[in-house]
Amino acid sequence: MEYTRDGLVEARRQIDSTLHKLRETVKTLQGKENPGRYKSQITLAERRIRAFELANFLIEREIDDM
């Protein structure tokens, strides 16, 4: 697929925003009185963070190759 530089930059911006929100969510859940109760939500958020970090890396590589 072909993407424009502007499209990739916007995608990266959106991913950065989502990453920020996910990281804040993890902090909030870990700071709760009984964080073990939220283990599945924390695990899911951490996996999403890793996936979005990978996506950002690939977008950056694509932008650099343009």
Image (spheres, rainbow, N blue to C red):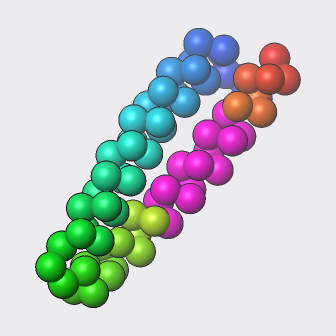
Q: Position of residue 28 (x, y in %)?
A: 24, 61
In magenta segment, residue 57:
yes
Q: Main secondary structure of the magenta part?
A: helix
Q: Say which of 19 and 35 sits in front.
A: 35
Q: Is residue 40 left or right of 12 when viewed as pictured?
A: left
Q: Position of residue 10 (x, y in %)?
A: 51, 21
**For residue 23, side relative to residue 25 (left or right):** right
Point 84% across, 23% down: residue:
65
Residue 34 on image: x %, y %:
18, 84
Tell me the quarter of the picture where residue 64 sits.
Answer: top right
Relative to 14, 21 lies left or right = left
In depth, the one of 29 and 17 nearer the eye is: 29
Locate the N terminus and report the quarter of the image it occupies.
Answer: top right
Residue 1, placed above or below residue 48: above
Specify the quadrant of the image occupied by residue 12: top right
Would residue 44 be found to the left or right of residue 25 on screen?
Answer: right
Above or below: residue 20 compared with residue 43? above
The correct choice, above or below, for 57 with respect to 60 in the image is below
Q: Which residues are magenta?
A: 47-59
